[in-house]
Amino acid sequence: MPKLHSDAVEDAATCSNFKEVRTTHLHLDLDVNFQKKQISSWLDLSLISLKDGLDFVFLDCHETLEVLQVKEKESDEKLEFSVKPFASYGTTLAIKLGSPKPKDTKFTLEIQFVASTGPGVCWLDPVQTADKNHPFMYTQGQSVLNRSFFPCQDSPSIKACYSAFVKVPPGLKAIMSANSSVFGEKQNRAGEDQCFYFEMSIPISAYLIALAVGDLKSLPIGPRSTVYAEPSVVEKAKAEFEGVVEDFLKAGETLFGPYVWGRYDILIMPPSFPYGGMENPCLTFVTPCIVVGDKSLTDVVIHEITHSWFGNLVTNANWGEFWLNEGFTMFGQRRIEEHLYGRPWMCLEAKTGQALLRRHLEEEGDNDMTKLRIVLESGIDPDDTYNETPYEKGFMFVCYLRHLALKDGQDFSVFDDFLKAYVNKFKYQSVMAEDLFDFYLEYFPHVKEEKLHEKPGFEFHKTWLHAPGWPPYEPDLSAGEELARPVEALVPRYTSPGEQGSHVPAIEKDWATYQILHFLDSLASTSPLPAEGMQRLLRDFPFLATSLNAEIRLRWCEIIIKNDVSANFTDISDFLKSQGKQKYTKPLYQHMVKGSEEVRALAVSVFAETRENLHENVRDYVTKILQDAKLMK
């Protein structure tokens, strides 16, 4: 089998010596203690030496992990170890082997440790949950947070299967990103059988190992899908997702090939969860913001399902190649949407994505973070590079690859077949952009023969991967005009002084969600609006302030800030208090600190009230925004 470019990958975000020794399996034995906010843990880490004379194993760890003991399991020999500084987001666990290992030697390290309040291990008091009756804990591994959950080779280039015992307090349930589980049928290390046991038989990167524990109920939503949630939420969640999830899975299989993971379940997270969704295999964690009541934000689940092929099955080899996960997933998500809802709907949804990218570029400028390939220097936290670029610019690059691939008269199925072949070739592996390019040029030889990949201004490497800013190619989204036309006809009523318009449509009832979002994006981009236009907007559409759709409320809050409508500042504070999603929280604070003194003061007061309910990363981002604006020390 030809070597991959990813075989020589460099990963500055890991301190592990993964080119000298590689993980082949992980087994965890966990005892979750909510009173102490600790997980008493054992890890059996199975490894294989990749060189002669291996004498040290270096693992990613974290200052919040207390390592108590390390043994070599085969000999029961206690090993010397030390913990050394590495970066702001982790430490190095250096383990000295009892004797040097020849190449290809398989061995297992038995590590006893305690995980507590690290950034990847989130403990919620009852008041922070939906029902407010029981505590909740969950882990969040992406990008480099699972090193605070367990010592590991925390690089997406390393994949392994895992198993785990999890003991939790009576009355609480544990669930993990695994494709099989039982309760009470196997004994853990302590000989107890009143515990959960999980197995993941498909190799995955360490960041995809996930655990949640809480007062969770479950209901079926499809032949291979269950929704988990707190008791007060589970029926609403079932109504939101029942039926549609199986449609999404079948569409994905039609377009990208077999769904190899067996089950696809969903966990509705507490409100403080910082992401829209996290694509943990077999068990997507999603924000409660998408439980709207009308299935209008179920495209978040389409996105996470698409990661089952792009990200979980074929994975970026380091975090500088994050666009390989997200660009292909955005493209795949929109192909599923097109398959199910038609091209006009998909095109309008894609337009809202482009609007997000434009706003990001206006906010941040054309800096290195707007390149598809990010060069991560040592010490740079991959989470600090997160923005819309890998998603939307990545989507446009995949659209460009399709554009080059299709000859006259060919339809999109030609590129769909390529995606199936790409997934099949690289499944269970991690790749670099060069691996994709080599396979693409082999699959579509005319692109290479005509040197279309080197066309000036559109070069795969020089321009697409390494140039910052807006991409050189935009896909044809004109099919969305039939849905956009009534939106664009209404906008002048609010942006042009004196413009009245003859008819105000009942947009809440008659428009699709992405028409409303396109409308609000247009108003936000031209704000501040004329005073009479803003008054008309408030009068015409009072539902915007109270919508259950978080995407609508985000845009509404942006308009309120940019137009300094102090009478509606409670709309902003109510929304920020209702959830802690990074995608919503961070941009609203960025807008507020650029606003009037009154809205700047609101930013400080709302953050003081909500900071303890936010995920650590989101809390740090908001703190920096307020500090940079000289509103906090």
Image (cartoon, rainbow, N blue to C red):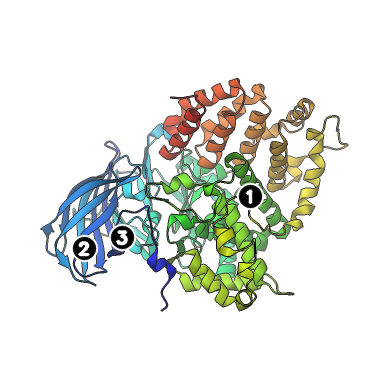
Q: Please name the amino acid that badge 2 sits on.
A: Thr
Which residue: 78% across, 34% down? 495
User: Hey, which residue is sitting farthest front in the picture?
Assistant: 456
Which residue: 85% across, 38% down? 503
Q: Quadrant of the C terminus?
A: top left
The residue carrying mark 3 is 163
Disc 1 crowd, CA 10 A, few/some/many (<14, 14-19, 20+)? some
Which SS class for mark 1? Answer: helix
* Marks 1 and 3, how far apart at CA: 38 Å
The answer to whether residue 78 shows anywhere in this view is yes
Q: Please name the amino acid that badge 3 sits on.
A: Ser
Q: Quadrant of the N terminus?
A: bottom left
Q: Quadrant for residue 335, please give it.
A: bottom right
In this view, the mark in front (1 or 3): 1
Which SS class for mark 3? Answer: strand
Q: Which mark, by number, is residue 108?
A: 2
Q: Please name the amino acid that badge 1 sits on.
A: Gly
The residue carrying mark 1 is 353
Mark count = 3
